[in-house]
Amino acid sequence: MATKIWAAIEAIPSAGATRKHWEVISGTEWSALSPLLRATGLEAETIPCFEVQPGGCIRRIVRHSADNIRAACGEPGALCKSEKLTAAKVEALAVDRVKLANGLAGALQLTNGRMPLASQNLINLGHHYVHAGLGFPVFLWLGANSFTDAHTAFADVEASKGAKLVLAPTDAGLGASAKAYLAKIGATAMSLENIVGIDAGSLIPLAPVEQMFATLRAEFDASDDDKKWRLPADATWNKVTIEFRELHEIELQYKGVKPKRLAPQDLRLWDFESSRPKAGWEVLAKIPDNGGILKPLNDKTRKQTHEAFKQTKKQLKEALEEVVSIPGDPFQYDYREKVYRPLFIVRSDALRQGREDQNW
């Protein structure tokens, strides 16, 4: 289980280095590191001398021909002898930020990250969800560990409210000033060498992710918006039930989770001018009577066109997503029947029973 690769990634500049440089720095873990590198297409001009002065004596790469490449000492007095190199050894390689970001997202259970640029220092790896669709952002810093403008370097981190995490390859990857600034803006700093390893060519967590992120998960729970309904991280829409308790009150239900009661006003589905619910609430209430289908309003007071119904469906979808953060559209379009079918269940048993009691 290789973990020293993080020191290699941190030691070599973002522009990359020769294959031999990477091999020497990573040692026995080269085979684990190599899948995370990419060819830059550039020709390296120098390579350190790893025998006389590691990291100090710089050799010039001299290409006499494809089969005759040598590393010649660039120091006055020639501190070391020239060395013959192969074309493969002087191939220029750099960290493949896309592969690294994708690998870390999988290992740390992150979702919805942003595609990094080739030389990007701060990478948005995505969110670690504590509840369905609700979690804290995780960033990766691959830049220098000392700089003068932390505010600019970590602007995206500061813009994120609540709990947030910034990763660096090693404990030394973030200097004292960076760590102080991150602490000031409420961000937690961790190093990959302590939480991520490699096994069989894949990045893996060194401990259960929930355990490694326990403090951050607790911090997120403490600061989370109470308006959001907190569901398990793997929750799906087809396990949600919406029950009409009263004409203007619904109860959201999910097995093992405290139900949440809402009125049209809570979902912004109330028209204050007419003092009645908006169309989105009305079509939701009619789903049980329509055989579980979302259909246009068509009664004495309102008859919806196709375009008007599309807007109503959008209105209802956005209203539900403000409270239920499960990823994905809660409605599925049936191309055969040309209707929308909710992935959740809608019941009006309590409402129907109340009406029967009134009739009695």
Image (spheres, rainbow, N blue to C red):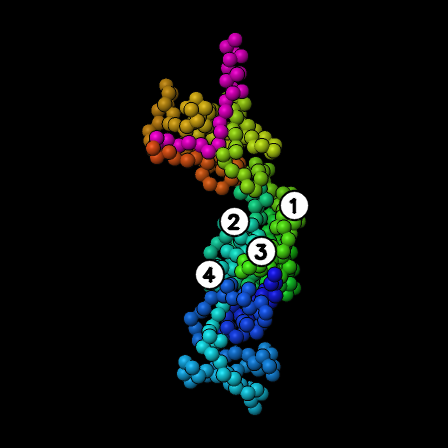
The disc at residue 111 is: 2
Cα separation, mark 1 vs mark 3, equals 23 Å
Discs 2, 4 touching: Cβ within 8 Å: no
Badge 2 amino acid: Thr
Name the mark nearer the viewer: 1 or 2: 2
Q: Quadrant of residue 257?
A: top right
Question: What kind of element bears circle 2?
Answer: strand
Residue 30: % across, % down: 55, 68
The three-letter code of the residue at mark 4 reads Leu
Q: SS class of the residue under badge 1?
A: helix
At a point 60% along the width and 59% down the height, the residue shown is 197
User: Circles 1 and 2: CB distance less than 8 Å?
Assistant: no
Earlier residue among tags 3 and 2: 2
Single out the mark in the foreground, 3 or 2: 3
What residue is disc 3 on?
204
The amino acid on which the numbered mark 3 sits, given as a three-letter code, is: Ile
The x and y percentages for residue 98 are 48, 59
Query: For residue 185: magenta?
Result: no
Graded by Cα atoms within 10 Å as few (under 14), some (14 to 19) or many (20 or more), the crowding at tag 4 reads few
Neighbours of disc 2 within 10 Å: few (<14), some (14-19), many (20+): some
Which is nearer the N-term, disc 1 or disc 3? 3
Q: Disc 3 and disc 4: Cα gap in Å?
A: 23 Å
Provide the residue designation for mark 1: 218
